Amino acid sequence: MIRPGKELLAVRPGAPAWGSGRSRTQHAALQKASSRADRLCRGLLCALCRSPGLDVHSGRVLGLLDDAPLLGQASASLLRCARYSPDPHAAQLLAFAPHHDRGVLTLVASAQEQGLQVRLPQQGQGAGAGAGAWVDVPLGPGRVAVLCGYSLSYALGGLLQPALHRVRPVAVAGSGGAGASAATAGSGRVSLAYELCFRPNACVDPAAITQGAAEQLPAAAAAAAGEGGATSRPALLTSALMERFEATHPVSINGSVRVKQAQPRAQQEPAARRQREEADLVSDGEEGKQKPAAAVAAAGRSGAQAQRAAGQGWTAVANGAAEGPQGASQAPPSDATEQQQQRRTSLRLQQQQNSRQNAPAPALTGVGTVKPVGTSGGSNGKEREQQAPAGATARHDAGAAAANGGAAGVSAAARRQREENRTAAGDEAPVAKRGRHDGGAVVEGEQAGSPAVAPTALSQPAPAGGSGNGGQMEAAAEGQHGDDRINIIIKGQGGSEVHFKVKRSTLVGKVFDAYCNKKGLDVTTLRFLYDGICVLDNITVAQLPGVQDGDVIYCWPAQVGN
Ligand SMILES: O=C(O)CCC(=O)C(=O)O
Ligand SMILES: [Fe+2]
């Protein structure tokens, strides 16, 4: 039976149990869809960062994501399946009211061509003919819409604006109206939206993320970014960022139908202040105007309907019950990443607290989800994080990402230069001389030469002496190392880490071999990714673009995702 309205099924990839009422086949299909969408989304994000128009260090953005979905570890990201049923009584209502998605990027796919619409920018960057008009985003087989979300816009200091979008109602079966076709008439519209989100305790610092990027932008875009741009956006934990989103988007139907509850009086003023601060992020008053539509949608998802929907294999999502990004703050932390993140987060939070005397209470509630810095033990002091697998999967999965490969190569040197300048200026200098991580491997002596890992990769001719620079990796006894040694972390697919302290002149292949020896792995079956780029074994550590103490190289099976 098709009922009027919209039904949503929201799942977080990697969640061990995806709710009741779903068969194993459904579970497997959702798992597959979400993991593919996740890879595509990360690849697109990586390509977007590296596109000449932005030239943002992709690691600074990708490092704010959680690990790629692993079974048994719920992701912060979310897959929404929506079924919009034909509704003869609600023809004037929108099936999905205008909204910004709260996450980083959303991919939307639907077998039905029509339904999704975006609003063209009214002013500033991208505004042109038809400014402010709603335009169709034709979907259908083989097509995916890519929407910039609030989190990405914030992280980029407004260099990209979040896409205001909505869904027009599907045609009533037999009406012959827009959207009806032999394939879809009578069944309503079904869409899949994958919303990539920052991990809950990531510290989103627009100023650090966009440093050096604006210089690449056309003057007009740079001006737009400067006004209310990165410098006026404080570093925030994702949880605080979501508070901000909610304060500036009073009614959101992003995954969950959220009707804003009356706030305690004490919280109203900061919320209003934040709303003013973020005037540049909210395109217009459209969302306010659409409140009635959202309220109708909310009313339509009563508990009784939710029960019926669940019985059909559709779990209704209503009033915050969704496993939305905000709910993901309960996700179990992955230890090593968490330790690094805690250190980074605490530094950022310190900055926040110093610079924002009037920080509203809700923004600080996120601190409660972060463990004290002291618990991070001897973890390496890594300032810049990376999420390597994205770039490689982008080349396999996303044409757009592949098309960007050249740009990535060109901008690498520029990025490195920027990083060096910044480090020289003491802006983001790594925290020096920390104790070694308890699990750190002591690497000694010469390892056998390692074969090439991947056909297309970051690679340079081996320096004189080839791979025979044995002895460059040395025991990392405290106090023995000079400034030319840095910590490099190899992170495996399951999240385990091995720490190496190496000379900058060491061939990375030596490190890979040492890692494989320690783990009992065959190096030829693996690829190593740094900042999303597959690294061959014949470059030195110093030749990794913008390498810093504590940087992570991800180790991934060569055939991943294929
Ligand atoms: O169904 C669609 O086309 C879009 C859905 C959407 O905007 C969302 O899930 O955030
Ligand atoms: Fe959306």
Image (cartoon, rainbow, N blue to C red):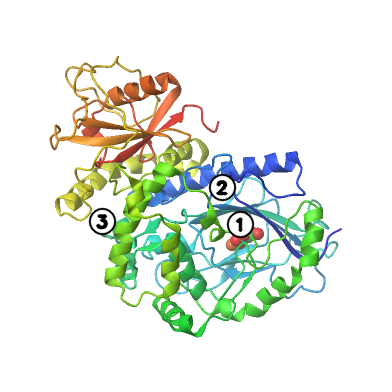
In this view, the residue in front, 299 or 341, is 341
From the image, tell me which residue sits under label 3: 212
Q: Tell me which corner region of the image, top left, top right, bottom left or bottom right, holds residue 83.
A: bottom right
The image shows residue 251 at horizontal and vertical percentages of: 59, 74
Question: Residue 468, relative to residue 81: is it above or below?
Answer: above
Instruction: Find out whether the residues at labels 3 and 2 contact each other: C-beta distance under 8 Å.
Output: no
> Which quadrant does ligand 1 occupy?
bottom right
Comparing marks 3 and 1, which lies closer to the viewer? Answer: 1
Q: Nearer the viewer, mark 3 or mark 2?
A: 2
- Which numbered disc flags the more N-terminal residue, 2 or 1? 2
Say few, some or many: other residues with alpha carbon within 10 Å of mark 3 (under 14 / 14 to 19 / 20 or more): some
Q: Helix, strand, or loop for circle 1?
A: loop
Query: Is residue 209 left or right of 465 when viewed as pictured?
Result: right
Name the quarter where the N terminus is drawn: bottom right
Q: Is residue 271 above or below residue 80?
A: below
Dots 2, 1 in contact, CB < 8 A: yes
Q: Position of residue 199 (x, y in %)?
A: 47, 53
SS assignment at label 3: loop
Q: Residues within 10 Å of mark 2 (few under 14, many from 20)?
A: many
Residue under the point 30% across and 37% down:
437
Residue hosting label 2? 74
Badge 1 is on which residue?
323
Quadrant of the image occupied by residue 550: top left
- Could you tell me the amino acid type at mark 2? Ala
